Amino acid sequence: MPIEQKRQEHEVRMIGRLELSVTGVKQLESFDQDEFLIETVEGMLSIKGGGLKLVNLDLERGVVSLKGKVDDILYLDSTAKESSKGLLGKLFK
């Protein structure tokens, strides 16, 4: 695989639930003190907690760093989204 097409590595590092860094970031979709939604090379990543603050954002290098209390880290699976839309669609028809 040529260097230009090499897939960027993705890594999530957490120190004591208070510091978190993510590599392989494509885009920071949204964030506030309770949740960060990050598009990574491995899919959408949701980070939930309290008092979350953006420390570093470098999209050129694909890095996001944050501080605050991390309660939950979850990859949002596109197939799960599709099936949940179907279920909600059935409920609200």
Image (spheres, rainbow, N blue to C red):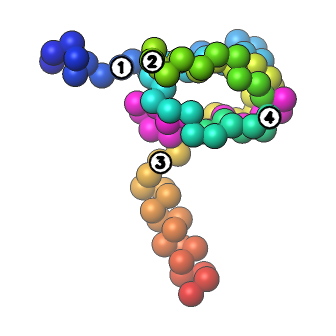
Work out whether residue 70 or residue 41 is closer to the camera in this orientation and state it.
41
Viewer-nearest of labels 3 and 1? Answer: 1
State the CA–CA distance, disc 3 to disc 1: 19 Å
Disc 3: CA contacts within 10 A as few (<14), some (14-19) or many (>=20) = few
Query: Badges 3 and 4: C-beta atoms under 8 Å apart?
Result: no
Relative side of 5 to 45, left or right: left
Which residue appears at 71% of the width and 23% of the height? 54
Badge 1 amino acid? Gln
Q: What residue span does the magenta drawing correspond to?
A: 38-51
Q: Secondary structure at mark 3?
A: loop
Q: Does 43 lie within the magenta span?
A: yes
Which residue is identified by label 3? 77
Which residue is identified by label 1? 8
Query: Badges 4 and 2: C-beta atoms under 8 Å apart?
Result: no
Which residue is identified by label 4? 33
Q: Does 27 lie within the magenta span?
A: no
State the CA–CA distance, disc 2 to disc 1: 11 Å
Q: Earlier in the sequence, mark 2 or mark 3?
A: 2
State the CA–CA distance, disc 1 to disc 4: 28 Å
- Point out residue 81 in the picture as x, y percentages from the top left corner: 50, 58
